[in-house]
Each structure stands twice: as structure tokens, then as C-alpha cells.
Image: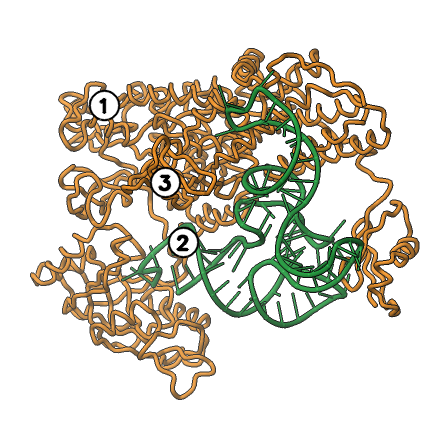
Chain colours: A orange, B green
Amino acid sequence: MPDTPAPASLDARYDFRAAEPRWQREWDAAGCFRVPDVPPADARKYYVLEMFPYPSGKIHMGHVRNYTLGDVVARYKRARGHLVMHPMGWDAFGLPAENAARERGTHPAKWTYANIANMRAELKRMGLSLEWEREFATCDPEYYGQQQKLFLDFLRAGLVERKESWVNWDPVDNTVLANEQVIDGRGWRSGAVVEKKLLSQWFLSITKFAPDLLEALNTLDRWPERVKLMQANWIGRSEGARLKFKLAEAADGVADIEVFTTRPDTLFGMSFLAVAAEHPLAAAAAARNPDAAAFIAECRAMGTSEAVIEQAEKRGFDTGFRVVHPFTGETHPVWIANFVLMEYGTGALFGCPGHDQRDHDFASKYGLPIIPVVKPRDAGADFSVAKAPFTEDGVLVNSRFLDGLDVPAAKRRVIEELERLQQGQGVVNWRLRDWGVSRQRYWGCPIPVIHCDDCGVVPVPADQLPVVLPEDVDFSRPGNPLDHHPTWKHVNCPSCGKPARRETDTFDTFVDSSWYFARFCSPRAGVPVTPEAVNAWLPVDQYIGGIEHAILHLLYSRFFTRAMRAAGHVTLDEPFAGLFTQGMVQHESYKGADGRWLYPEEVEKRPDGTAIVKGTNEPVTVGRIESMSKSKRNTVDPGAIIDRFGADTARWFILSDNPPERDMEWSEAGVAGASRFIHRVWRLAQNLEGGADEAADKKLRQTTHRTIAAVTEALEGFAFNVAVARIHELANAIAEAATAPRAARAEALEALVRLASPMMPHLAEELWSTLRPDAGLVAKLPWLEPDPALLAADTLTLAVQVLGKLRATIEVPVDATDEQVFALAEAEPNVIRALEGKPIRKRIHVKGRVVNLVA
RNA sequence: GCGGUCAUGGCGGAAUGGUAGACGCGCUAGCUUGAGGUGCUAGUGGGGGCAACCCCGUGGAAGUUCGAAUCUUCUUGACCGCACCA
């Protein structure tokens, strides 16, 4: 074995603090990640996008994981010869900026842009292959101005409506609250009891696309099944019938009530009709009966929060009205019930307690009749629905012309009959509701319309766009600062010239994020999107983000793309061809002796497994591993990790721990392990001298090329943890092959560097520049191809089983015949012993895998 | 309630019908070091045996198969989504 040459320097450690910023500058100077707005005709484009962050002030480990995953894909696809677009921006509107303004007196814009500056610097330290030239924030007037144009286009295309809707209203803050901002029926900030209020709001007509949004899920073959399922549930298609019940006597002009049902077959089991508290008939009842009014007020005070509805007991109020059954002519009472939703179906239903759990609960409570109309095929004499409803398929009974039919046939038959009598028809109902986008907030995109007493709602003319937020705003008063700004809302009507008022509501921030991926294709254009750019780059080939956006953001973006198509901006429907949802980053949580939460850096783990507060003897309770959150202080600051270990270590660890779709545990030991490996590779590269061992040469070269194939396969399949493991194996093989020739060791290390480069790009460049000083940047190299000659083995190791149990392994030539293989296998002493002299009844040989002898 | 996903050493996980536990973390022993989260070597699923080897083992039960972590059925548990949706 040759002598080890003296190391290049005394301090033989990889200096990532110098190397990482240096390579980041090199990539930048070489323009490695820049692409044109319109890709050349012969380019194989690939658009990698991670969900853009909200600029809260600092990046967190979830961002590190998200952007590392995207960066590996981007760098790998680039090496594969794709023209890769990989942009970054900021989802910059939203409530936290207003809260900061209220609490600290900092203007939302100042706060937001300062946060962006800070987070941009942090992201840059990670060495991401991003094209920063495309950066924008949704709060830039250049961006939201284009959004206003889009909105007006949608308005013209008939995709926008202004209508009344019930909202959660906080009477103290004078604002609408989202459902998630209502906690136990109270406003999350003010603590005031939230009311339901009818407000005029802007709606985007997402329901017009409901059938297509559902159908097209089938075409998204690179989306996780569960996300598609969640979207399908959310869109909520259900088939049934609408039918009208005539009131026995009309009330305040209301002559009939329309209901939706998915079980028209159970119509003969009806015992009551129930309407929502917001239903017109409920209002009619309230007008005549103060008790009804009181009941409705109670329902309304309950709020629209679904969590509240869920816990509420089923309650009702008999209005005294009666409806006539379309087939029997019998009359049934009309109740107001708190479990009926005005927003679903028609806000009214017929109750069939025998075959629906809720109706059963309700009927039991108020002593309404429970009539069975479907019974199981094998029903005995004791069949009854008195105690519990029967909700499965069976045979219709007590139902006149439906008797004897099964449930699906009865549904068809009764719908035919309803249609014949013009009492109702078969319909498809959707759970999805139109998207209310009005928010009574300052820090959002102004809705570009003007309200004129004479002309009504007038769009802001194109030459007056963008409608820019005023800077001088007062956050000391509750409510919307735009609404009580002294001058901003007062404008002249663009149509008649008389004094008029600007819309003071701004858009839901989900609007901002519904088309940013399209804007990235031509971020500086004077139109929302330039068709040549957007139609060439879209769809996003790989979109990566958290599962928490599985429904809203992704559904809104799918809708927006369709709306943009309808308005002539794009030629495609689906924005995201591939979707990957990453798991969350978790950490142990810690509590001090007095129960206060502690940050990981305040805690010292002792060898016996216990923990103490650093620098003291205070015992620490080690809690559950759970998702990092500020409130539990179980967060780790990415900046501190990069300072201490470098970006490559953070990236390597986050990829190696587990499959990226699962939640991962951030552990100090894991980071240290990743750091050790980085330094180990660096040391390996310092000494590539070897020997002349031919066997070792062949073995190492085979390992190298098998690793190329294995890592490639792993990266293609998002199995980054497996790719890491294969690279570890290659490093182990290089270390073990000390007697292999220098050429083989260098080849192996070069392969290692290049295979690892999407994951640890800085170390890769650092080593490559010493291994191949004239070969340019790794970031510009094509991906490695394995040599087929070295992938092929000349012998195979076969497992030899007797009766399915492993008894020996044998080495056979690749071209060995079945007979040769069986002869070798049966000659193995262990196999002979296991056979116990019994005759072999069956011989199985699966080439390259296994031999099984059945005795 | 409805729908879905998952269950493998002390831990993260690998293997998608063919040698279970790759790779890493942790741990044990030894060596090394100008020791500050250092490097190297060996070991590490359980049980038995000096050893060669043998038995058991992928939440549990049954099944299909020459062969099952992998496929089927049932069951238990955990997690996720939806939910008075008529």
C-alpha cells in the first residue's frame, strides 16, 4: 500500500463558511439558473415550483424542507438536459401585516418588505438554484394591478357576481371573519360573540366549473390520490331530485317549498319538512309568531362555524305551516330546524326518519311518526326502524307504485313520476359554493370597482389601473382603514362623472396565490400574462408544497386557470401537472420545572437520557415529538443551523431522514451525522491514491456504475432518502477500496460528487473544482449515465431455498442453464441436509433471484 | 358516521411476490487524537449453540402461492380528510 501523502493543509477540514458563499457567487455570475420568458422551440422545458412563502420575517424548517426538495428536482432536471424555470416570490398580503401595524405602529408595507429582505437573504444562503430575476411580491402594485385587470376580465366574461351572503360578523371589530377565525362562537381577536349577517359580497363563479373541476381530477395522474379525493369530496357532487311541496295555505306569498333529496325513493316515508333558519318560510313564520322569531335568532347567534354546528343538539320549532304530499295528498308539518343549512341544496328538506339518522334523531325528539318504506331483502318479522333508521339498499314497502322495487330502481321510478306530474325533476347537486372574495381589510388587493348611486357598480377604467392602496392609513380605529380613510374612496363615477365611492373591500389573499405561477412566466409584462410565455411554460411540471393547501389553494388555482382560459389569457385548464405534498418538520418539545416551554437550544441532554436547562440543574421534561410551532417553542432556526454546519449539511440531513411525503423529526444527532458525512467525503477526496488490485478495481467500478443507476432511479421516484443511502454506500466502497487503482477511486469519487450535487451543491462544486480544475461548474454538467458493461455481472448470487426457506447461497455464471443451477444448488451441504434425503418434487429457478426446491 | 392512509430492530427507514432489516441515528467494545459535539475498526432483531448452524420474527388471525413485509379476507390500533351535505 502506498504512503499517504501529506494533507494539503494542516487544517484538513472543509471550510464551508468560505466555500458556500463563493459557489453561490459563481452560479450567479455564470447565470446558471436563468431562462428566457419564451423558451426556444427545441427546448425541453421543465417548470419546478415550490409554494411561495408568506413573508412572516424568518424562514422556518418547513421552508427549508420545501425549497430543498424543489431544488433537488430543479438541479436534477437541469442536468437531465431540461430548460428549468425555478422562480421565487412572496405571498405578501394578509392580516399579520395589519396586526403588526396595530401592535407596533409599523406600516404594513414597511413591515412586509423588511421581512422579504430578510427572508430573501436567508433563502440565498441555502444555495437554491432559483432565478431571482423573476421575483415579485403580491403586494407590489405591478402585480396586484395586473390582478385587478384579470378581475375585470372575469367580470366581463360573466364569472363574477355580487350577491348577498351570510357571513360571520364581529360586531366589535366591525369586520367579517373567516370560519377559522371564529373560536367557540367568538371572534378570535375581540372575543365578541359572532353574529350571522347578510352582506353584499363579490363572488367568483367557481361553481360554473364544478363538473369540469371534478372530472378533470382524473387527468391529474401525477397528483397524490388523497389530494384528488379531498378535492372531489369538497366539490361534492350528489345525484338526487328537486321537488316542490305545496303549502296547505300560502303564507306571505310563499306558495310552495322546494327541497333537494338524494333519497327520493323514501318520499312515502316522509313525516315532516324542515327548513333552515334563514329560509324565507322561516321569516314568514317569525312575522306571525314571536317564539319562531326567538328560535331563529338563537340559531343565528350560533355562528356559521362548522365546529359549532357539529356540537349543537338537533333542535327545531314547529311553524304551524303544513305542506301537501305530492302523491298521497296528506299534510305534513313544517319545522324550522337548526341542522338544515341554507347554503346546501334549497335550504329545505323532507324528513324521512325511518331511513336517515338525523331525521330519526329529530323525529324521536319531537315525537314525529317514523314509517318504514325500505326493508332488507332478508328482513324478518321483527324488522323495525323505531330504534334506528335503515339506510342500506333493500325492497320498497308502504310506497304504492314503488313497492317491490330496489332503492336505485325506486329512485328512477319516482323521479319519472315527479317529472310527469311536473312536481319535480332529477338533478345533480354540488356542495361547492361560489367563492366569496370580499374582505374588509386594508392589506390586500383593492377590488377595482366604483359604486355610483345612478350607474350602480362601474368597473374602474383600464387607464385608471392599478387602484393603489393609500399609504396614509389609520389603524387606531377598529374596522377597515380603507373605509374610514378621509379621501381615498371618494371618486367621480367613470360613467356619469357624479361623485361616487370606491369599493373599500379588498380581495381574499387566496386570489393573489391563484395565478402567481402564471405571472412568473413573464413577471414584468404590462399584461397579466403574455400568451407565448405562459402557454409555453405552463403547466408547472412539478409543484411542491404542504398538504394544508390540498383543497383551497389548489382548487382556486385550478379554477383561476379555467377562468383565465375563458377570458382568453391562457390555452390550458390544469396549472399543475405534477404535485408533491411534503410532510411537516417536527421536533421534541421541552418544558421546564415550572411548566414553561423551552427552546431546544436552552436544553442540555445528559448521557442518562434525562435533560436539564443549560447552565443550571433544573430538570426538563421531554415532551412529544410534534410539528414545530412557535407556541411550543420546539423550533430550530435554519439560520443558526447554516451558521454552524453549513447549507449542505442542512439540506443533506433534511433529505436523508425519511421519505419526503412523511413528517420528519429534526434531531440534533441527525444533523451532526449529516455534517460528519460531508466532512468525510471531503477527506476521501484528499487522498485518492490507490494500488493495483485488479479485483478491487473491477468491484469498485461496478459499484460506481450501479450507484449511478440506483441514485438516478431514486431521484426519479422522489426517494431522496434512498438516493442518500446509495451515496453513503459508494463512499463506504471508496474507503474500502484502498487497493484499487487511483483511476477507479477517482472515477468513483467524481461520480459521488456529481450524484450528490443536486443535494449538496456547494461541496460538489468545491470537490469538482479540485478534481477537474478545467471542467467548469457541476451545475452545468449533464447527468451521468451508467456504463451498461459495468452494470452487467458475470456471476449472480442466488438464494437457494428448500420448501421456501433459505438454506444456502450459490454463485453461478450469468448464462448458467437451469440444469447447471439446480446441480449446484443440490450439491450444497446445507441443502442436502435440509432435504433429508426426500425426493425433489418440484424445482423453481427465477433467474438472478432464487432457486426453490420442493421436496 | 362516511372516505382514505399507514403499521417492519432501541429510533428514522430499505426491500412492492424471490436472501427481511440496505443506509443512517443510537448503543457496545477496542484503538486513535494537539479531546471543545474528532477519526478508525469490529459488533448490534429475539432465542439456542464453542462452532458449523438451527428455531422464531414485518400489529393480530386466516387464506392464495413453490415462495408473502408485499396479494386477498377478517381484525386491532394510529393518523389524515370530510361531515347535521338532505
Is residue A538 rendered to the left or right of residue A176?
A: right
Q: Secondary structure at mark 2?
A: loop
Residue type at mark 2: give it. Gly
For label 1, the crowd category at 10 Å Cα-Cα, with few meaning under 14, some 14 to 19 and many 20 or more, is some
Mark carried by residue A590: 3
First in sequence: mark 2 vs mark 1: 2
Closer to the camera: disc 3 or disc 2?
3
Quadrant where the N terminus of chain A is found in the figure: top right
Q: Position of residue A247 (x, y in %)?
A: 20, 67
> Which marked residue is nearer to the observer: mark 3 or mark 1?
3
Contact (Cβ within 8 Å) of mark 3 with mark 1: no
Q: CA–CA distance between discs 3 and 1?
A: 61 Å
Amino acid type at circle 3 is Tyr
Q: Secondary structure at mark 1?
A: loop
Q: CA distance from mark 2 to mark 1?
A: 41 Å
Q: Residues within 10 Å of mark 3 (few under 14, many from 20)?
A: many
The residue pinned by badge 2 equals A236
Which of these two is toward me, A609 or A773?
A609
Residue situated in front as seen by the camera: A650 or B32:
B32
Q: On the rendered structure, is A710 left or right of A621?
A: right
Q: Nearer the viewer, residue A19 or A334?
A: A19
Q: Assess whether mark 2 and mark 3 are in contact (beta carbons under 8 angstroms).
A: no
Q: Nearer the viewer, mark 2 or mark 1?
A: 2
Residue A494 screen position, x and y as percent = 23, 23
Q: Are marks 3 and 1 on the same chain?
A: yes
- Residue A716 visible at all: no
Residue at 29% across / 23% down in the picture?
A: A461
Residue A180 in picture, x, y percent from top left = 29, 44
Which badge, 3 or 2, comes first in the chain's sequence? 2
Up/down of A584 relative to A460, above or below: below
Q: Which residue is mark 1?
A: A494
